[in-house]
Image (cartoon, helix red, strand yellow):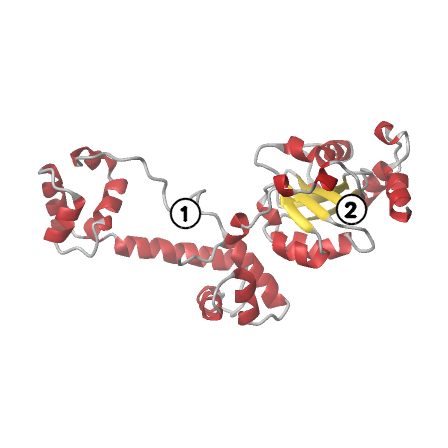
Amino acid sequence: MYKHIKRDDRVCIALMLKQNCTYTEIGKELGFHRITISREIKRNSNESEIYQVSFANKQAKEKRKLSKINERIIDNDIGLKNKVIKYLKRDWSPEQIADTLKLSSHMTIYRYLIRNPELKKYLRRQGKKRRKYGTKTNLSRYQANKRSIHERSQEVKEKQRLGDWEGDTMVGTERKLRIVTYVDRVSGYLIADLTTAKADDIHSLVKQQFKGKICKTITYDNGSEFALHKMIERDTQALVYFADKGKPQQRGCNENTNGLLRQYFPKGSSFATITNKDVQCAVRKLNNRPRKRLNYLTPRQKFLLHFRG
């Protein structure tokens, strides 16, 4: 089955090009043939022949829109349109009309009816309402390959070990800047950094964030900023899981800690006015604050205790 290259794939392509990966390597990572990758880069690079995600995505959308307009042969031919409507009013089926008018497919008429729903009353069978192609059921490769939170081992669920993290981002008013946070489920130890909402920036930060720290699993919410979760798995050697949509309580440790962090960066505040130094200052305060659930040890003490033990 043919698959279109989507935005999440373009993020990965741009990142791997920066790492001087070949088209074959990129195709293998994304599940496409190297020629498909080559065509994508050639078609959607800018005038300087640089492949940028935003530009490539915009180009692809414009070309898809243009191709759809060109495919609307009924809309573009008044004579043909009048004949289609005439036969519909005679209670002919789209298949019968397409055969009579020598159209390539009866789906051309069905698509015309979707754009003109007032004509559907002439169909013998109204049928079920179909979901438009390209909407939520058509998941990208990254969405489709997500590992569910329900697949986590009992050891992770019962908080029996160090290194099982929950991840999320906190959003500023400008939305382009985020504080990406990770919280260890056992100790409550927090890692956080100021970054952008781009998936490749969050992926690039991962190695640095977990350097020298044990990382066995990460459980994220369903934000698109974690689209490169397969590459995060590769770089951290951790299994990445995703919580169910609309259920933040499944990552309660991370949600609660983000609430504590909001003491320093309230909702509705701008992240453009802060620096990563400000974030690290707040992180140190939280990691050195005693917690009742830890018998008044600090998250840092608990983390080091387990790490050494």
Whether residue 1 is visible = yes
Relative image position of residue 309 (x, y in whole percent): 90, 46
At numbered mark 1, what does the secondary structure look like: helix, strand or loop? loop
**What's the amino acid at mark 2?**
Gly
**Of marks 1 and 2, which one's residue comes earlier in the chain?**
1
**Residue drawn at the location 14% of the way across and 45% of the way down:** 84
**What's the amino acid at mark 1?**
Gly
Residue wearing tag 2: 163
| Distance Cα–Cα, label 1 vs label 2 | 37 Å
Relative image position of residue 160 (x, y in whole percent): 79, 39
Q: Looking at the image, is 230 positioned above or below residue 132?
A: below
**Residue drawn at the location 84% of the way across and 29% of the way down:** 293
Relative image position of residue 119 (x, y in whole percent): 19, 36
Is residue 199 left or right of 48 when viewed as pictured? Answer: right
Q: Looking at the image, is 46 positioned above or below residue 110?
A: below
Occupied quadrant, residue 116: top left
Q: Looking at the image, is 83 positioned above or below residue 253?
A: below
Mark 1 touching mark 2, by CB under 8 A?
no
Q: Which of the two residues, 86 or 154, is positioned nearer the viewer here?
A: 154
Relative image position of residue 101 (x, y in whole percent): 12, 53
Q: How many marks?
A: 2
**Residue drawn at the location 90% of the way across and 40% of the way down:** 301
